[in-house]
Amino acid sequence: MKQKRILLVRPDRIGDVVLSTPIPRELKKKYPNCFVAVLLQDYTKDIYLNNPNVDKIIVMDKSTNLFDKSFREKVREIKSCHFTHSLTLLPTERINYMLFFAGIPYRLGVGNKLYQYLTLTHFVSRKKYVPLRHEADYSMDSARRIGVVSDDLDTEIHLTKVELNNAKELREKLLLGKKYLIGVHVTSGNSAPNWSPKQYAELINELKKIENFQIIVTDNKVPDEIKNIPGIEFPNIDIRLRESFVTFKALDLLISASTGPMHLAAALKVKTISLFCPLTACSPKLWGPMGNESRILLPKPDYCSLKCPGDPKKCNLEGRDGITINDVLESVNNFIY
């Protein structure tokens, strides 16, 4: 049988890429001799480094122009790999034409725009999220179309032995003799509803009062309201994404909104408590952490019916019937011990 050579295309954000990680694993289970490559943005390639199920990582160029010199060079690079299949989880016109001109025989993706109908050979439908399933499950549909039969959607990041040892050493350094290392990730890059930095500052001050808890903030850029809290470390400031994995692996628990670092923690099998909005586009049924022990916090139904601004990016989940500091503290106490 001719070797399947499969290119998985996911050129978007951290959480989206993490949720694609079950696919290479399941492809290799179904086709042990297949060749699997991933096409990603440069800043997300760290998610797939050291992954035993991925044979090659191809990094997207930064150009946005169709048919320029960079486009032609990337087409040649893709063509040189002799792919038999491409599975495009996030279509863009430029990438679709790259795969077309690279001559990949089987090109699968979502098809609802003219350029997609022109450049794809096979299509997968989302049917407007009806019924609502998890993003990782929708992504796995692409692999199912070429023979994979799996509902294993656990995400994964593979650390090296050195990185695992570094995580143990960092944990001991940050704990300062205490028992539990709790991470709080304050920002979300406007990817989902989230508390204000002021609310997170109040939470951190309450968590500091709990015996045997050592609190760190895992953001790489820390809001001013958080910077001056005494006794808090900020180990992820100005470090590479891959280096931050060591920090997340050192944790007992990460508290955050629905954001990329939540998915990183889940893939590293770290417990998470996550603040979510129930709107379909933000729902934990669609974007919840996969593969770890997790707790999801939602505002009360009255909050959404009475206070929802209609734009998730404008919602801070605070106030009456929102997600309170006490809600988080209660969840922590029930979860960590």
Image (spheres, grey):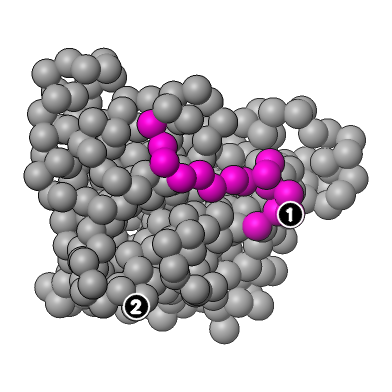
> Chief secondary structure of the magenta span?
loop
Label 2 crowd bin: few (<14), some (14–19), many (20+), radius 10 Å: some
> What residue is shown at x 44% (from left), y 68% (from top)?
147
Residue 72 seen in render: yes
Q: Compute the Cα span from label 1 to label 2.
A: 28 Å
The kind of residue on which mark 1 rests is Pro
- Mark 1 or mark 2, earlier in chain: 2
Magenta range is 119-133
Is any part of residue 44 visible from this angle?
no
Residue 229: % across, % down: 43, 47
- In this view, the residue in front, 119 or 297, is 119
Horizontal side of residue 259 vs 82, given as left or right = right
Quadrant containing the C terminus in the rendered view: bottom right
Q: Nearer the viewer, residue 284 or 90?
A: 90
Horizontal side, residue 154 vs residue 245: left or right: right
Residue 24: x %, y % from top left: 33, 65
- All told, the count of numbered labels is 2
Q: Which residue is mark 1?
A: 131
On-image quarter of the N terminus:
bottom left
Q: Quadrant of residue 107?
A: top left
SS of the residue under disc 2 = helix
At horizontal 50% and vertical 22% (from top left) the residue drawn is 114
The crowding category of the residue bearing disc 1, from other C-alpha atoms within 10 Å (few below 14, some 14 to 19, many at least 20), is few
In percent of width and height, residue 294 lies at 57, 70
- Residue 29 is labelled as 2
The residue type indicated by label 2 comes to Lys
* Image-based side of 125 in relation to 250, left or right: right
